Image: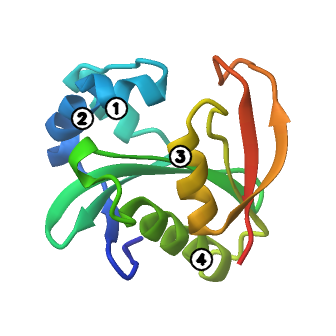
Amino acid sequence: MRVRGRLTTVRPAAEEDADLLVRWHADPDVARYWDDEVFTRDEMLERLRRPDVEAFVIEEGAHPVGYLQVWAEGGEGGLDMFLVPDARGRGLGPDAARAVALHLRSARGWSRVTVDPYLWNGVALRAWRRAGFRDVEEREPDSDHTARWLLMEFED
């Protein structure tokens, strides 16, 4: 899957991207949004090979600016995403998220595309809303979330 938005292109992440993704996750201004998870190169390669999660690199022009992953379950699924700090604030995240959500709905026939940002992450909440996601329900921490979070659903 290669998806083009107005401002971005989202392409499959390859093994050649592993070192870049390790560096990005090691940045405290990225890691804090991913529960401070950091990865070794081998761990990242393992993550890129997960059968239940598709990994993508977001590009602005030919320049990598972020990461997006897609997980699926029975005709629906969700997205997780981050942009590197110097790519934020220009509409790139909402553009990439919207393009991928539209692709999943049209090309793959998904009935539902969701995201699950933390309630404390106001920047992400606004970005997801700009991408076309609407608030569904606030939820408590669980095995996948260390803080209160918001279930959001794509609505085109």
Q: Secondary structure at mark 3?
A: helix
- Residues at badges 1 and 2 in contact (C-beta under 8 Å)? yes
What residue is at 30 percent from the left and 21 percent from the top?
A: 39
Q: CA distance from mark 4 to mark 1?
A: 26 Å
Query: Dot 1 surroundings within 10 Å: few (below 14), some, or many (20 or more)?
Result: many
Q: CA distance from mark 3 to mark 2?
A: 17 Å
Residue at label 1? Answer: 30
Q: Secondary structure at mark 1?
A: helix
Q: Quadrant of residue 149?
A: top right
Q: CA distance from mark 3 to mark 4?
A: 19 Å
Q: Quadrant of residue 143?
A: top right
In the image, which disc is placed on residue 102? 4
In the image, which disc is placed on residue 45? none
Label whose residue precedes the other's in the sequence (4 or 2): 2
Residue 35 in picture, x, y percent from top left: 49, 20
Query: Dot 4 surroundings within 10 Å: few (below 14), some, or many (20 or more)?
Result: many
The amino acid type of the residue labelled 3 equals Ala
Above or below for 138 versus 28: below
Please, which colouring scheme is shown? rainbow
Residue 38 in picture, x, y percent from top left: 32, 19
Residue 141 in picture, x, y percent from top left: 74, 19
Label whose residue precedes the other's in the sequence (3 or 4): 4
Residue lying farthest to the right in this orientation: 137
Q: CA distance from mark 1 to mark 3?
A: 12 Å
155 or 48, nearer to the observer: 155
Q: CA distance from mark 4 to mark 2?
A: 26 Å
Label whose residue precedes the other's in the sequence (1 or 2): 2
Residue at label 3? Answer: 124
Label whose residue precedes the other's in the sequence (1 or 3): 1
In the image, which disc is placed on residue 24? 2
Residue 85 in picture, x, y percent from top left: 27, 42
